Image (cartoon, rainbow, N blue to C red):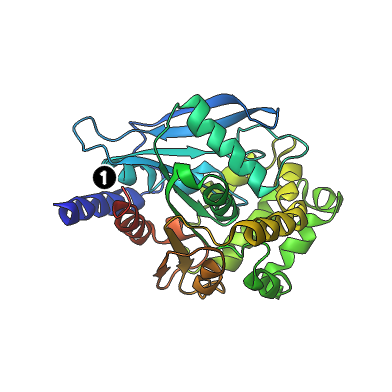
Amino acid sequence: MYLLSICFVLLNIAASFAAETTFDTSRWTQSKIPIANPSGESLVLNTIDSPPRSNATQNGVILILHGWPETSHQFRHVITPLSDAGYRVIVPDYRGAGLSSKPKSGYEKFQMAEDMHTLIQSHFNISEKIHVVGNDIGGMIAWAYSARYPNDTASVAWGEVPLPGTVFWEEIYSSPEAYHFSFNAVPDLPEALVTGKERTYIQSFYDGVSVKTHWITDELVDYYAHQFSRPGALRAGFELYRAFAQDVKENKEWLEKNGKVKVPTLGMFGGAFVLANGGEMVREVAEAVEDLVIPGTGHWLAEESPGEWVEGVLKFVGKHS
């Protein structure tokens, strides 16, 4: 029955992905949610909340965290298929992104994990363990969530990012493919150079780190160019990178004190991208690790190969629900 359910979900993905603008949002609620985190900050997090079908078995909650330069829109093709499989799916724009608050500080990934934990427990009043999934910067936050809140995390799936503080991080940080890690972290200059040219800069990442390109439409690039043209959006996005030095410090300190994460972990990578061998890095920071490497896929897993992404996530979280 479970395999039949996955097949049904994958058929629905194929139908929705055939037309970029027709993904099913009928059960989504999207709203700006005010939170006050334990660090004393008040933020607004724009969040999509998609419940399971009313007649579906309730399997749990999946929190999905996007990367840069994207927003919750990154997961438009996979939200409803996951909720069709019986999961409540919660997808926020993290601090600094989309329609969420853009404070001047707080872009360390442990801090951003605190934002997410506050959203889940204090706003949604979800006390059960949840599944956390992240791509790119969202993967850094997902690992931090599982490290900081292991008793509230049923499983974590993350990838397509070198985690600050690992050996893999040191290798990738200095590589030509990661030039933007250094550029984005320079104070003030990126804002001066990219303002008014947001579309050109964003397009360069889609062109440079994707393998399948059918999903990269003018409409999509225009959407993200608009998002990053909002007041404070470029600065907030670059602050994610300016926080990397502190992320390295905090991650190393946490691992030295606590050892590897004990939460069941799935490493997720595109088989045709430079990070394809990232599974070794995941094992550097987590104990119980499985791998999902999607063949013929670049950096944007849920957009390039949404069917394979959903199938992999459902198989993994199904073991821990």
Residue at 35% over, 52% down:
17
Q: From this viewpoint, is residue 298 visible?
A: yes
Looking at the image, residue 9 sits to the left or right of residue 89; the answer is left
Residue at 27% over, 41% down:
86
Image height check: is 168 above or below 315?
below
- The percent position of residue 73, horizontal first and vertical second, equals 50, 43
Q: Quadrant of residue 57?
A: top left
Image height check: is 150 above or below 42?
below
Q: Quadrant of residue 303?
A: bottom left
Q: Secondary structure at mark 1?
A: loop
Q: Quadrant of residue 258?
A: bottom right
Between residues 215 and 120, which one lies in front from this camera angle? Answer: 120
Residue, disc 1? 85
Seen as rendered, the residue at the extreme front is: 257
What is the total number of numbered labels drawn onto the structure image? Answer: 1
Looking at the image, residue 6 sits to the left or right of residue 242; the answer is left
Image height check: is 76 above or below 300?
above
Between residues 254 and 240, which one lies in front from this camera angle? Answer: 254
- The percent position of residue 28, horizontal first and vertical second, equals 38, 31
Other-residue count near label 1 (Cα within 10 Å), few / some / many at <14 / 14–19 / ≥20: many
- The percent position of residue 313, horizontal first and vertical second, equals 36, 55
Looking at the image, residue 106 sits to the left or right of residue 144; the answer is right
Q: From this viewpoint, is residue 214 visible?
A: no
Between residues 164 and 305, which one lies in front from this camera angle? Answer: 164
Residue at 55% over, 25% down:
33
Circle 1: residue type: Ala
- The percent position of residue 264, horizontal first and vertical second, equals 42, 57
